[in-house]
Amino acid sequence: MTEFLDLLFTEYASPFILLDTVIQTGQFVDFLETFGRKREERIRWEYYIHKLSPLDDRSWDQFNKDLDGGIVMEERPSDEEITETVKQSYKIMKGFNPERG
């Protein structure tokens, strides 16, 4: 929580008024998502400007695509796959005897 408040104070002169307003209007979650997304973009931009080699000729868009390309979202297993996994696990546990090892 302290880190979050530190971040807010670096961006806003009086974050408590802002927080009160977004909470009262029911937009607190939206504010947090936007704040986090903008902060992430700012960090990427600073890295892009200051840390990339001058020989790296990627555009800002290509740089972001390359970074986001490493993020792979896992698919949720289907209900049938979950049921089958539970059945197989149950069979394994049913045949388990701790005395035999």
Image: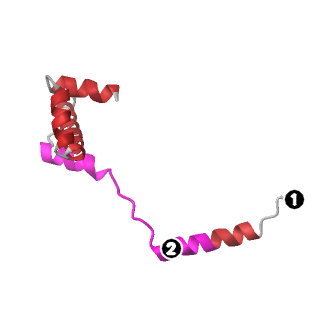
- Magenta stretch: give its range: 60-87
User: As rendered, which of 58 and 30 lies closer to the eye?
Assistant: 30
Q: Which mark is residue 99?
A: 1
Q: Quadrant of residue 32?
A: top left
Residue drawn at point x = 50 percent, y = 73 percent: 81
Residue furthest front in the image:
24
Task: State the quadrant of the N terminus.
Answer: top left
Camera sees residue 50: no
Q: Which mark is residue 81?
A: 2
Q: Position of residue 10 (x, y in %)?
A: 19, 23
Residue furthest bottom in the image:
80
Magenta segment main secondary structure: helix
Q: Quadrant of residue 73?
A: bottom left
Q: Which mark is residue 85?
A: none
| Above or below, 70 relative to 79 | above
Q: Position of residue 5 (x, y in %)?
A: 27, 27
Report how far apart the C-alphas of labels 2 and 1 lie in the structure. 31 Å
Residue drawn at point x = 25 percent, y = 46 percent: 29
Q: Amino acid at mark 2?
A: Glu
Q: Position of residue 57 (x, y in %)?
A: 14, 40
Q: Is residue 55 left or right of residue 93?
A: left
* Residue 30 lies within the magenta run: no
| Mark found first going from the N terminus, 2 or 1 | 2
| Above or below, 9 relative to 97 | above
Q: Is residue 82 left or right of residue 74?
A: right
Q: Position of residue 91 (x, y in %)?
A: 70, 72
